[in-house]
Amino acid sequence: MTEPASGVSSDVCYRHPNRQSFVLCQRCGRTICADCQTPAAVGFHCPECMKESRRSAPKTKPRILTAMRSTSGAPVVTWSIVALCVVVFLAQYLTGGPGSGAATAALIYFPPFTEFQPWRMLTALFLHANILHILFNMYALVIFGPILERALGRWRFLALYLLSGLGGSVAVLLLAPGIAVLGASGAIFGLFSAFFVIQRRMGGNSVQMLIVIGLNLVIGFIIPQVAWQAHVGGLIVGALVALVFLRTRAPAKRNEQRLLLLAVLAGLIVLTVLGVMLLHARFGL
């Protein structure tokens, strides 16, 4: 990895020394501001690395499905999650309704099912109870998803989303093991907290985001039949994953990042096992 040019602070753009930034070029490691960033497969590239990449690339490139290329900058993961949620919601309606239909029964998360059907802890993220439920969650995803996906890269964003959603299910298992839950809210709250943590670290104004999180948490406590436990679990895990990304943003720390994400997953699995043991002790399952 090429070191930043001497005489230039590591937290300012190498082309614009008056602009503070914490984003590094994934190829050369130099700090780059928003105007100098080009989305890449992982993170961003600086202008010089992009020029070098274009010179070495084939002259003729296929134009079909260019949005699927990781260098296109299109928020493919965000739109894929939205599409999947919409398809599953239609399946819920076509198989008896969101409340008690066959699709809902097959995918909903109910803590006593955890020991034998643990995948429900994630499949429930793609179910929704009614039209307002899916509209609110998908609106929040469309607002925050593309921003985070472009900043983190696709696989990091997907890891953030799924780990946050899993964290929400684990919180339900530990705090409210007698209720069945569905919806993407745990993952969405994970995006909220990750956005807050990253924005605060970058020096942005985080007051508005804090208000959004606070209002949504209060609504979850006030409105009946809302699993606030999933919201809290998603918030905690989303913030933790964001801290991992910030700690390991340098290309040299890529392996450390993977290990820390696996550690977060392992911690959630341990808590899940603990929750199942508590279920056995409480209900004699």
Image (tube, helix red, strand yellow):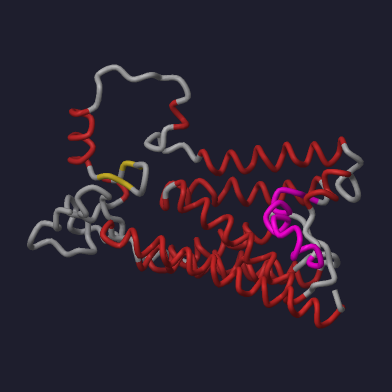
Q: In the rendering, at what x and y percent does residue 222 appear?
A: 80, 71
Side of 210 where 152 appears, left or right: left
**Residue 88 colored in magenta in the image:** no
Which of the 4 image quadrants contains residue 64? top left
Residue at 69% across, 65% down? 169
Q: Closest to the observer: 175 or 225? A: 175
Q: Is residue 279 left or right of residue 187?
A: right
Is residue 115 one of those drawn in magenta? Answer: yes
Q: Which residues are magenta?
A: 111-128
Question: What percent of the width, then of the height, locates residue 30?
Answer: 20, 54
Q: Report if residue 208 is visible in the image.
A: no
Q: Is residue 53 above or below residue 167?
A: above
> What is the quadrant of residue 161 in the picture?
bottom right
Q: Position of residue 37 (x, y in %)?
A: 30, 45
Q: For the C terminus, which image quadrant?
A: bottom right
Horizontal side, residue 11 vs residue 278: left or right = left
The residue at 28%/52% (across/down) is 33
Q: Residue 162: name its quadrant.
A: bottom right
Q: Is residue 128 left or right of residue 205?
A: right
Where residue 246 appears, x then y in whole percent? Answer: 38, 65
Residue for point 57% across, 48% down: 143
